[in-house]
């Protein structure tokens, strides 16, 4: 890595030197829009519809924020520099000429908003209207990286007009599979994974082909962007299906993963089922967020402390597991990979995929 390089991150597993860890402080329930029905648990829909813009339950939020602080302390103890976003007001309503939102969401999941590809920091054009200003909590960090030499690539600001969203009950027979249409480029950064000079993406209910094409053309010919299929009718974020942990080692969801020739020759491990109790509150996603681990280097991963079957499987696979309590964070839609943005890793542009 060149000296004093502000950003350098080509893979999900090279030795980690610096990371952004999000914060859930001040988080509010998202303002409901129909495209959310494709991805959020059915039990959470009425909560979003009734409590959009209102604060999350205080006790659970406090416990989750304590877990995030403990993660930051653990990463620091592992020799990683940790930076955090600035506090912003998420409960304030806002509007555009076409729509309005009763509030924002949180600054807890920088992986959804931003992706570092080499020395490029890409800002995602997200399709959930309540997340329109979410990147503001990270704006000072972004400007700091740019001033220190990083490339800053914000995607076109989306209109998020009604034309972007598929009519509920659309015609699946005509390929109308996703909640978002091709009206304008949209994507969540968490629908992309880095494999050196290769970037792997999925279509989902928040990422359209227009958005993938924009990213492919914008980051340049140094990188190859490939789209893979997944068996996930509720697809939102590829890191709930794939977790590359080291060169040639891929942790996968046992039902969502669809074989791709990109990974021919890779050792593939199906993740064991999560151990989260059935009655645990999950507002945004399924318990399979358990496989959303964070690689510190090709031999070390951060794993939820109570996911014993996963820890055993990864240990048998040759990894050192760093256990951290994180179940309260689960409730808000992510785990270790989601709540972090790896800004500096050792290593450079290499070819890992076929």
Image: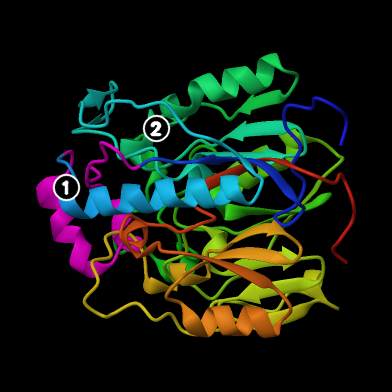
Q: Distance from label 2 to label 1 (Cα)? A: 20 Å
- Kindly identify the residue that appears in the image at 33 percent across and 25 percent down: 88
Q: Residue 211 location in percent, x, y?
A: 59, 42
Element on which disc 1 rests = helix
Quarter where residue 210 is shown? top right
Name the side, left or right, on which 86 lies relative to 237. Answer: left
Q: Residue 114 location in percent, x, y?
A: 56, 38
Pick whichever of labels 2 and 1 is earlier in the sequence: 1
Disc number placed over residue 354 in the picture, else none: none
Label 1 crowd bin: few (<14), some (14–19), many (20+), radius 10 Å: few
- From the image, tell me which residue sits under label 1: 58
- Kindly identify the residue that appears in the image at 29 percent across and 22 percent down: 96
Q: Is residue 122 magenta?
A: no
- Kindly identify the residue that appears in the image at 14 percent across and 56 percent down: 47
Element on which disc 2 rests = helix
Q: Is residue 190 above or below residue 105?
A: below
Q: Residue 62 location in percent, x, y?
A: 25, 48
Q: Residue 342 location in percent, x, y?
A: 63, 44
- From the image, tell me which residue sits under label 2: 134
Instruction: State the extent of the magenta-drawn residues as a range.
Output: 24-53
The answer, for residue 327, to whether it is visible in the render is: yes
């Amino acid at each position: 890595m060149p000296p004093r390089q502000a950003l350098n991150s080509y893979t999900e597993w090279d030795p980690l030197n610096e990371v952004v860890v999000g914060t859930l402080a001040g988080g509010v329930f998202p303002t409901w829009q129909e495209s959310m029905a494709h991805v959020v648990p059915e039990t959470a829909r009425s909560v979003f519809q009734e409590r959009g813009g209102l604060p999350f339950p205080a006790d659970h939020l406090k416990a989750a924020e304590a877990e995030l602080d403990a993660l930051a302390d653990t990463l620091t103890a592992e020799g990683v520099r940790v930076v955090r976003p600035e506090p912003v007001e998420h409960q304030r309503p806002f509007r555009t000429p076409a729509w309005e939102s009763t509030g924002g969401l949180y600054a807890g999941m920088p992986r959804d908003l931003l992706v570092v590809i080499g020395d490029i920091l890409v800002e995602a054009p997200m399709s959930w209207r309540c997340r329109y200003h979410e990147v503001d909590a990270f704006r000072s960090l972004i400007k700091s990286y740019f001033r220190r030499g990083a490339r800053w690539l914000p995607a076109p600001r989306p209109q998020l007009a009604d034309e972007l969203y598929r009519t509920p009950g659309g015609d699946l027979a005509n390929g109308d599979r996703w909640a978002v249409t091709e009206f304008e480029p949209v994507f969540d950064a968490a629908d992309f994974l880095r494999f050196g000079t290769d970037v792997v993406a999925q279509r989902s209910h928040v990422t359209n082909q227009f958005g993938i094409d924009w990213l492919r053309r914008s980051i340049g010919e140094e990188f190859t962007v490939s789209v893979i299929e997944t068996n996930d009718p509720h697809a939102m974020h590829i890191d709930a299906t794939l977790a590359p942990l080291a060169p040639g080692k891929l942790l996968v969801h046992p039902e969502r993963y669809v074989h791709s020739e990109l990974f021919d020759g890779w050792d593939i491990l199906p993740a064991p089922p999560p151990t989260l109790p059935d009655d645990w509150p999950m507002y945004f996603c399924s318990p399979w967020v358990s496989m959303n681990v964070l690689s510190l280097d090709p031999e070390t991963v951060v794993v939820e402390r109570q996911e014993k079957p996963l820890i055993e499987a990864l240990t048998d696979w040759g990894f050192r597991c760093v256990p951290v309590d994180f179940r309260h964070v689960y409730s808000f839609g992510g785990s270790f990979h989601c709540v972090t943005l790896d800004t500096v890793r050792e290593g450079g542009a290499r070819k890992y995929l076929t």
